[in-house]
């Protein structure tokens, strides 16, 4: 298996050669991938022109006088190149770059399956790396000095990075014979009783992987689905959709549910925590929402009760996604409330808003492989747990 060393040889040839030499010295096969839009490709195993041929719009796509456009096009070409390779032949990927190179390279890294070693040495790795890492397992290493020549600092940092990726490539985690099929579940604090009960019931046969529905959590689960590491999903907490549509801080973006739909794996979903949009501390709630039904969950989190109009939009969004499902799917609607605080006597109890959500989903779903069921209980009640487990057994029986 090869370790791919990625960077711009027109500006970082010495650093790329240094890292490649150390990785090779650690016993790994190495290939230098040149992503320089102005580079002639000298000294690279994969040249810019070879990468450009992988761009879906053809090799001329990277030939732009605008640097930003050219860099973005090269990132697309690199992504298509990496994903054209057999993941089993990639021992690891290491990138070197400043802000532009980091953006270019990590976008392509994010397209690789979870588990393929990915390390980015970057001048921006000491700041907010969320835009670069996303829901993947990219390791970010701060370069300390700029990646602009070899010196007493950069040699040490780059050597550490080279030996780290070599270690990742040559010492993979052993497969455990007792590994069970993995099932993804989404959870929030207000759906914890439901998901805890599901985990207790499933863990004897499956390996439950629970994802906190914080935006990145939903993205991470779907990345694992895309990487063929999850065999089914119990998507009980779809609250990230509310944040996406209304503007909360825990959105998973417009692609939520897309990987699941494309994968065709068995799916059971629900409307957990769609009674709320998430904001930070109370003083951070946008001015237009100050008069809404707000609930201070803790000093750092404020929840806002969603309205019937907002729930109509959530239902339409979910229905549109369910209509793209290619696998057996059941979607459950808890008539007694969608969270712990959407129940009689609780601050977010609003059966009118909930029914708008339910009706929008029921009226919008037309896919023949998706069944919608109303359950006359709160989402955390034992009756709903039983209904979820029954639906899960059904979709697993008819899976492809």
Image (cartoon, rainbow, N blue to C red):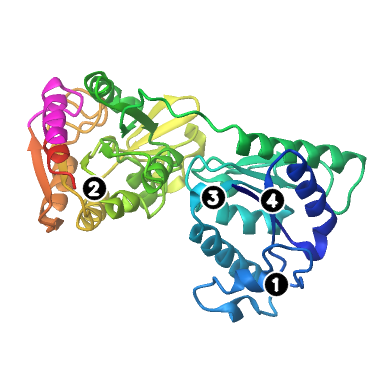
Disc 1 versus disc 2: distance between alpha carbons?
43 Å
Residue 320, image x, y percentages: 23, 58
Disc 3 versus disc 1: distance between alpha carbons?
32 Å
Query: Where does the magenta region start and end?
Result: 376-393
Q: Earlier in the sequence, mark 2 or mark 4?
A: 4
Category of crowding for the residue at label 3, using alpha-carbon neighbours closer than 10 angstroms: few (below 14), some (14–19), many (at least 20): few
Quadrant of res 230: top left
- Residue closest to the eye, 295 or 199: 199
Find numbered disc 2 in the image and state the secondary structure of the residue it sits on.
helix
Position of 274 relative to 59 (above/below)? above
Residue position marked by numbered label 4 in the rendering: 30
Q: How many marks?
A: 4
Tell me the mark number nearer the camera, choosing from 1 and 2. Answer: 1
Number of the label disc, if any, that sits on residue 311: 2
Left or right? Give the position of 346 relative to 35. left
Q: Earlier in the sequence, mark 3 or mark 1?
A: 1
Disc 4 versus disc 3: distance between alpha carbons?
12 Å
């Amino acid at each position: 298996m090869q370790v791919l060393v990625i960077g711009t040889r027109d500006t970082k040839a010495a650093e790329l050669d240094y890292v490649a030499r150390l990785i090779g010295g650690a016993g790994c096969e190495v290939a230098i991938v040149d992503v320089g839009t102005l580079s002639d490709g000298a000294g690279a195993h994969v040249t810019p022109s070879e990468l450009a041929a992988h761009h879906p719009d053809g090799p001329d796509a990277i030939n732009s006088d605008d640097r930003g456009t050219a860099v973005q096009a090269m990132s697309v070409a690199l992504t298509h190149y990496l994903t054209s390779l057999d993941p089993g032949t990639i021992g690891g990927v290491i990138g070197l770059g400043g802000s532009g190179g980091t953006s270019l390279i990590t976008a392509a890294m994010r397209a690789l399956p979870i588990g393929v070693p990915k390390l980015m040495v970057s001048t921006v790795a000491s700041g907010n790396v969320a835009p670069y890492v996303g829901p993947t397992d990219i390791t970010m290493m701060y370069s300390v000095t700029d990646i602009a020549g070899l010196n007493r600092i950069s040699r040490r940092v780059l050597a550490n990075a080279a030996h780290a990726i070599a270690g990742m490539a040559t010492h993979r985690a052993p497969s455990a014979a007792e590994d069970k099929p993995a099932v993804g579940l989404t959870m929030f604090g207000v759906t914890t009783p439901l998901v805890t009960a599901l985990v207790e019931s499933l863990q004897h046969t499956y390996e439950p992987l629970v994802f906190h529905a914080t935006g990145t959590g939903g993205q991470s689960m779907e990345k694992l689905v895309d990487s063929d590491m999850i065999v089914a999903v119990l998507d009980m907490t779809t609250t990230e959709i509310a944040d996406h549509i209304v503007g909360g801080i825990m959105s998973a973006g417009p692609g939520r549910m897309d990987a699941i739909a494309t994968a065709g794996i068995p799916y059971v979903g629900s409307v957990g925590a769609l009674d709320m949009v998430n904001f930070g501390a109370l003083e951070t709630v946008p001015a237009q929402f100050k008069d809404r039904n707000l609930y201070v969950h803790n000093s750092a989190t404020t929840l806002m009760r969603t309205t019937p109009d907002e729930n109509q939009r959530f239902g339409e969004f979910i229905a549109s996604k369910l209509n793209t499902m290619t696998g057996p799917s059941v979607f459950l609607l808890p008539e007694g409330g969608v969270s712990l605080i959407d129940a009689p006597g609780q601050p977010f109890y609003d059966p009118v808003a909930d029914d708008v959500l339910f009706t929008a989903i029921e009226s919008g779903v037309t896919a023949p492989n998706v069944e919608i069921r109303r359950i006359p209980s709160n989402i955390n009640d034992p009756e709903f747990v039983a209904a979820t487990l029954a639906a899960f057994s059904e979709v697993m029986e008819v899976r492809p």
